[in-house]
Image: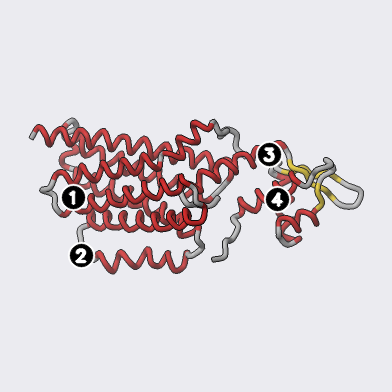
Amino acid sequence: MVLQADLAAVEEVLQFIGVFVSFSIAFVAYKGVRQTDSSSLLRLALAFVFLGLGFLVESMVGLRQVIPYLSTTAATVVVGGLLLETTGYFFLAFSHVVDVMLSKRAGAALLVFPVITLSGLQLSNILSILSFYFVMYGVVETVYSYARTRKPDTLLIAVGLSMIGLGTFFQWLSLVYQYVGVLSLLQIILQEMGLLMLFTPVLRFAVGGVKVDGAV
Amino acid sequence: MVQYRTQVKIIADVLVTARDMNTEGAGVGVTALVRKANMSYTRMSKLLSELVGSGLLLELDGEKISKYMISEKGKQFLVAYSSFQDFAQSFGLRL
């Protein structure tokens, strides 16, 4: 029982790290939107705003011992958080779809594939698998981009996204096998490690002292 | 696969051309910009008026034709473009 409470506390802390990292990336991307008017950065900012909100909402579940009202709405909060998270991953994948100019074919695949494979599953499960699908699409595109640019940061982001993808897969497993408590912790650890890898370009931005003030 | 240029990339290309070709400080003509930026004359004319309007380019009135040079704001845009391009590329995206 004590161990379970400890795990819940660790999960809570990790969720808040996720919130911080997501909003930091969204902030830098938004600065980029203001300065360059780039639609790619706008989609990236939107993706991480949704992800940050998703993590924030999901972290509320852990507060149900402090706020009793949340106990009765925990299931709704989980679905709400997952919905926001999935929307974030969708924008992440969508950025690549637009970027590679395959919007018709890939866009259709994004819509059709999950519907065919996921009918009959519960909403949370569907959202988790959708997230997994979107992230893996992002991984493929990022690896493809790395093959062109050979930029180490891009490879790091691809690895980070893979870990997030694996995390979402464990998230789905934790929903199916709810009695295996460690799955949920594994999911959060993988997602947080992945998010911290995505944080690298933001850190480089901060350390490099790039001028980000003054809109064009 | 054909890589289309985004609007931001086109703007950056025009600004870089206006900066690099303006060696004598007298500005760069539309023809030179069209050739270097690989755009049609009509599209370039429209873009140039937008860039002048937003203060990224300065229009110098010549005897026959207008010439253009990059403004301080345009130079700042290129600095921002370069750094955010790096940021976007890390995520496998193009600006």
Nearer to us of marks 2 and 4 is 4
Q: Considering the numbered disc 1 on the image, is that residue within a helix, a strand or a loop? A: helix
Task: Report in which chain the residue with disc 1 lies.
Answer: A
Closer to us: B26 or A55: B26
Residue A48, given in percent of the width and then of the height, sits at: 40, 44
Residue at 53% in and 51% down: A39
Q: Considering the numbered disc 2 on the image, is that residue within a helix, a strand or a loop? A: loop
Residue at 53% in and 44% down: B86
Amino acid at pointer 4: Val
Amino acid at pointer 2: Gly
Residue A110, given in percent of the width and then of the height, sits at: 37, 63
Circle 3 residue: B75
Q: Residues within 10 Å of mark 1 (few under 14, many from 20)?
A: many
Marks 1 & 3, CB-CB < 8 Å contact: no
Query: Does residue A187 appear to the left or right of B79 in the view shown?
Result: left
Amino acid at pointer 1: Ser
Q: Is residue A213 above or below residue A134?
A: above
Task: Report in which chain the residue with disc 3 lies.
Answer: B
Circle 2 residue: A120
Nearer to us of marks 3 and 2 is 3
Circle 1 residue: A174
